[in-house]
């Protein structure tokens, strides 16, 4: 991949963040629809501040006697001023005259409490208060909001970078969502964040955080999404065990060491992304419990073989990316992909794989994208590949393959220039298959001298004359032929997918 940050177009990037906001809001709103009374704590043993009282379902503040808690109102004034939003101090009651980005709930005495604060310009259509990027800070008064469930800052401190305040760890047991995304935060992740034991979402994506991942995060046992991607974190991945974790994203850091086997005990995982780190050692062969895993990206690390035998037990896996790992002359077992019926994208480019292409790949009838280029595969292309009727992109170039390709006209028409076969020892096409009459470009192989499967000599290159083909489908038009566009498509598809799963 040529891009280290997997950038998205601005409008698409903003839309994804809108989805994230919707997700965090729905986490909060889901509590409202369960019953008419919403308790701050789930059990009598929880440490709830003595000043906290149960909140009553409802957001309307039309009652004439409704009022915002005085201490919390002053805290909101302080927070707004710290972000350059001085206009808020002219609002006599922040819940009655509230804006997009603040949510309130009443208690039994009709006193309103702030339960959600959001800042940052996600798009031209959002009305969240923006931050002054040159002078904004997070006010310590935020700890005076004991009922806060959601705190969201996006691109608020880009030109005034400062560490994540440790006092955020005092926000209390009510906080469920903490998003500090693309803020330019520096320094380590505070150990105090481990005190937020009711968190469901912790998102510190794309800051400049360094140091190691705090072991204290293990105390947040109900965490469902942990995103520490695109930072400068170092050290090894601690033995994290989150029984309810759905998303774990640590991509684009500087993490070293091996993948801890304890992660495979996170049986609720749906997305696992450790790409673009410096991880080494083998993939732990203990994958049998990850029945819900749909995406695993370990690309661009220093991971070595052997190829894990338990990989084929991931029956729900749809995306597997191992590109750019040395793998140590690994041979993939012929049955290495048996049972992975849901796999749609498989990328194993430049992983130093040897031997024959596994026959089991030809049984994955849902495959859309298959990249095996830049390896040391030998022998012929399995004839079962002609059954991959959903395939829209295939890269087998830069290997040691020989023999006649088993593709028919329809498959070649569908893939067109996304079929890469060049730089092999002796691939060719059989004249009797009619491929020479159906291909409208030169994809790097020639006509077989003999129709025998082992023929490796070529005498004629495929014609590049223009010839009409059948109408292509939408999937045919989706190109991930460049690594940057592939990354954009992947981040969009997986983010929307996991958001829908949460909902």
Image (cartoon, rainbow, N blue to C red):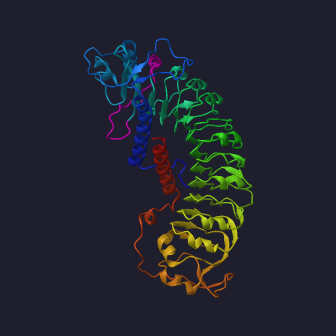
Q: Residue at x 65, y 88 (%)?
A: 450
Residue 376 vertical position relative to residue 17 in the rendered view, above or below: below
User: Residue at coordinates 59% horizontally, 77% vertically from top-left?
Assistant: 406
What residue is drawn where x is 41% and y is 20%?
55
Q: Quadrant of the C terminus?
A: top left
**Within the magenta stretch, is there residue 424?**
no
Q: Residue 190 placed where, x, y %? A: 58, 26
**x then y, percent, for residue 438:** 48, 81
Residue 105, quarter of picture = top left
Q: Is residue 55 above or below residue 459?
A: above
| Residue lying at the far front of the rendered structure | 35
Above or below 242: residue 462: below
Report the number of discs: 0
- Viewport quadrant of the N terminus: bottom right
Of 313 and 461, the residue lying toward us: 313
The spot of residue 483 in percent (x, y) is: 53, 57
Viewer-nearest residue: 237 or 242: 242
Compared across the picture, whether 289 is left or right of 344 comes to right
Left or right of residue 45, residue 159 in this image: left
Relative side of 265 to 41, left or right: right
- Based on the displayed image, in which of its 4 quarters is residue 361 positioned? bottom right
| Residue 26 spot, x, y in % from top left | 42, 35
Side of 425 relative to 54 (left or right): right
Residue 133, visible in the rendered structure: no
Q: Is residue 344 above or below residue 381?
A: above
Pick the residue in front: 123 or 39: 39
Q: Main secondary structure of the magenta part?
A: loop
State yes or no: residue 137 in magenta: yes
Q: Is residue 48 visible?
A: yes
**Region rendered in magenta:** 121-147
Q: Name the residue rendered at 43%, 44% in the picture.
A: 16
């Amino acid at each position: 991949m040529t891009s280290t940050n997997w950038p998205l177009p601005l409008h698409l990037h903003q839309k994804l963040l809108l989805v994230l906001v919707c997700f965090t809001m729905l986490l909060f709103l889901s509590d409202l629809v369960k019953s008419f009374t919403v308790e701050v704590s789930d059990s009598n043993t929880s440490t709830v501040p003595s000043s906290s009282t149960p909140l009553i379902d409802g957001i309307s503040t039309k009652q004439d006697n409704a009022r915002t808690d005085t201490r919390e109102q002053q805290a909101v004034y302080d927070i707004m001023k710290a972000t350059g939003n001085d206009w808020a101090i002219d609002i006599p009651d922040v819940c009655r005259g509230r804006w997009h980005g603040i949510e309130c709930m009443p208690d039994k005495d009709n006193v309103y409490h702030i339960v959600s604060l959001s800042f940052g310009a996600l798009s031209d259509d959002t009305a969240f208060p923006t931050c002054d990027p040159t002078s904004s800070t997070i006010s310590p008064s935020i700890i005076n909001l004991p009922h806060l469930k959601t705190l969201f800052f996006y691109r608020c401190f880009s030109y005034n970078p400062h560490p994540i305040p440790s006092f955020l760890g005092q926000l209390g047991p009510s906080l469920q969502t903490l998003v500090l995304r693309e803020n330019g935060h520096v320094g380590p992740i505070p150990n105090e964040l481990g005190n937020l034991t009711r968190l469901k979402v912790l998102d510190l994506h794309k800051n400049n955080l360094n140091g190691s991942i705090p072991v204290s995060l293990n105390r947040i046992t109900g965490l469902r999404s942990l995103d520490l991607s695109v930072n400068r974190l170092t050290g090894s991945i601690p033995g994290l065990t989150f029984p309810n974790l759905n998303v774990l994203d640590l991509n684009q850091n500087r993490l070293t060491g091996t993948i801890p086997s304890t992660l495979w005990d996170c049986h609720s995982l749906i997305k696992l992304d450790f790409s673009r780190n410096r991880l080494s050692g083998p993939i732990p062969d203990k994958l049998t419990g990850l029945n819900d895993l749909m995406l695993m990206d370990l690309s661009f690390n220093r991971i070595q073989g052997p190829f894990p035998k338990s990989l084929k037990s991931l029956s729900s896996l749809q995306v597997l990316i191992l590109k750019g790992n040395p793998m140590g002359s690994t041979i993939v077992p012929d049955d290495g992909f048996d049972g992975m019926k849901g796999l749609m994208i498989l990328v194993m480019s430049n992983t130093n794989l040897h031997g024959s292409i596994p026959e089991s790949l030809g049984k994955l009838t849902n495959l859309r994208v298959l990249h095996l280029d830049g390896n040391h595969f030998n022998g012929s292309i399995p004839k079962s590949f002609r059954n991959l009727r959903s395939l829209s992109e295939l890269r087998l170039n830069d290997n040691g393959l020989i023999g006649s390709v088993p593709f028919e006209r329809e498959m070649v028409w569908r893939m067109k220039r996304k079929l890469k076969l060049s730089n092999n020892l002796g691939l060719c096409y059989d004249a009797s298959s009619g491929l020479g009459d159906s291909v409208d470009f030169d994809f790097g192989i020639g006509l077989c001298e003999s129709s025998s499967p082992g023929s490796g000599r070529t005498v004629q290159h495929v014609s590049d004359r223009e010839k009409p083909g059948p109408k292509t489908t939408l999937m045919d038009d989706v190109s991930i032929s460049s690594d940057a566009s592939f990354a954009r498509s992947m981040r969009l598809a997986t983010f929307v997918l996991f958001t829908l799963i949460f909902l």
